């Protein structure tokens, strides 16, 4: 497990506070990014404040990130350690449906894996 620090809302009404948590190890298709910046969009605020219902606390908002790659999985060929990397609002799709094959993963018929 990877020890990680962030700023979390411990409850829907609480101010953000420093928070330590564990992440899974880097898998063969993953990259590990040391985050230097993140945006805080409306989704982060609604989720942290449980305004859409179903939020899980503690919650570390900031799901769109930029940082430096510090580790790559065994099958990753196009991204190298030390490169800058950004992640938007989703990180995976099926890669086989018509939408994915034409480069429109946001319309993946199986659904995307949201951040
Ligand atoms: Zn967002
Ligand atoms: Zn797809």
Image (cartoon, rainbow, N blue to C red):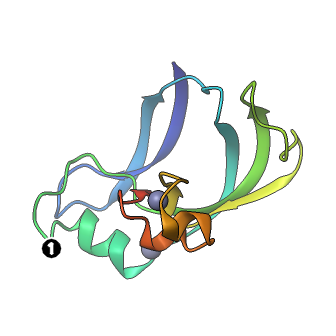
- Viewer-side residue, 87 vs 18: 87
Q: How crowded is mark 1: few (under 14 residues within 10 Å), some or many (20 or more)?
A: few
Queried on whether the Cβ of the residue with tag 1 lies below 8 angstroms from ligand 1, the answer reads no
Residue 99 on image: x %, y %: 50, 70
Q: Residue at x 86, y 38 (%)?
A: 81
Taking the image as shown, residue 24 lies to the left or right of residue 29, namely left
- Viewer-side residue, 58 vs 42: 42
Considering the numbered disc 1 on the image, is that residue within a helix, a strand or a loop? loop
Q: Which residue is drawn at 39% across and 52% down?
A: 60
Residue 21 on image: x %, y %: 42, 32
Picture quadrant of residue 101: bottom right
View quadrant of ligand 1: bottom left
Q: Which residue is drawn at 21% across and 48% down?
A: 57
On the image, numbered disc 1 is attached to which residue? 51
Q: Which residue is drawn at 48% across and 51% down?
A: 94
Quarter of the image with the C terminus is bottom left
Q: Residue furthest bottom?
A: 42
> Is residue 89 something one can see in this rendering?
no
Residue 16 on image: x %, y %: 36, 58
Q: Residue furthest top?
A: 1
Taking the image as shown, residue 95 lies to the left or right of residue 115, namely right
């Amino acid at each position: 497990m990877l020890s990680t620090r962030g700023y979390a809302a411990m409850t829907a009404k609480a101010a953000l506070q420093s928070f330590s948590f564990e992440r899974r190890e880097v898998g063969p298709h993953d990259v590990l990014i040391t985050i230097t910046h993140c945006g805080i969009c409306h989704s982060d605020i609604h989720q942290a404040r449980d305004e859409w219902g179903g939020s899980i606390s503690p919650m570390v908002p900031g799901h769109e990130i930029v940082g430096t790659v510090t580790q790559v999985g065994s099958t990753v060929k196009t991204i190298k350690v030390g490169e800058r990397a950004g992640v938007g609002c989703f990180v995976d799709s099926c890669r086989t449906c018509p939408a994915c094959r034409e480069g429109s993963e946001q319309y993946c018929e199986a659904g995307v894996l949201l951040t």
